[in-house]
Amino acid sequence: MPDGKPAGVRCAQLTPENLCLLFETPLRPAVCLSLRPGAAMCGGSAGEAMERLATMERETEPGGS
């Protein structure tokens, strides 16, 4: 996503199984390379992870709360 990924928008590089199409390629963005997911981010399930990520996106978007 050349202009960045807006909060709440699914990354264009994710497969239906939520796998990254750019993983382990030189095209993977620096922000993705630096991401180190852990229990605080991912919770105990895929659903909980998605809820937490959505919250983090809302809280860090420009002008967000």
Image (cartoon, rainbow, N blue to C red):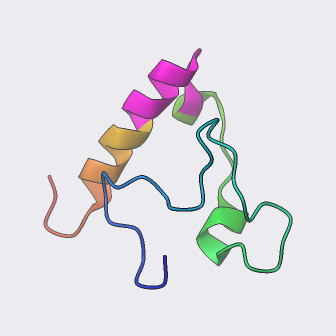
- Count the numbered circles shown: 0
Occupied quadrant, residue 44: top right
In this view, which residue lies farthest toward the top?
Answer: 44
Q: Is residue 51 magenta?
A: yes
Instruction: Estimate the x, y position of residue 23 in percent, counting from the top left.
Output: 78, 60
The residue shown at (30%, 51%) is: 8
Q: Against 56, is 31 above or below? A: below
In this view, which residue lies farthest toward the right?
Answer: 24
Comparing 15 with 35, the one in front is 15
Instruction: Estimate the x, y position of residue 18 in percent, counting from the top left.
Output: 62, 40
Comparing 25 with 62, the one in front is 25
What is the chief secondary structure element of the magenta stretch?
A: helix
Occupied quadrant, residue 22: bottom right
In this view, which residue lies farthest toward the front?
Answer: 16
Q: Against 12, is 38 above or below? A: above
Q: Is residue 43 left or right of residue 37?
A: left
In this view, which residue lies farthest toward the bottom?
Answer: 2
Instruction: Estimate the x, y position of residue 21 in percent, counting from the top left.
Output: 72, 59
The residue shown at (26%, 63%) is: 61
Q: Is residue 33 left or right of residue 1?
A: right
Instruction: Estimate the x, y position of residue 9 in percent, counting from the top left.
Output: 34, 55
Q: Against 13, is 17 above or below? A: above
Occupied quadrant, residue 37: top right
Q: Is residue 4 magenta?
A: no
Q: Is residue 34 left or right of residue 3?
A: right
Q: Is residue 64 left or right of residue 46?
A: left
Specify the segment rendered in magenta. 42-52
The residue shown at (45%, 32%) is: 50
The residue shown at (46%, 21%) is: 48
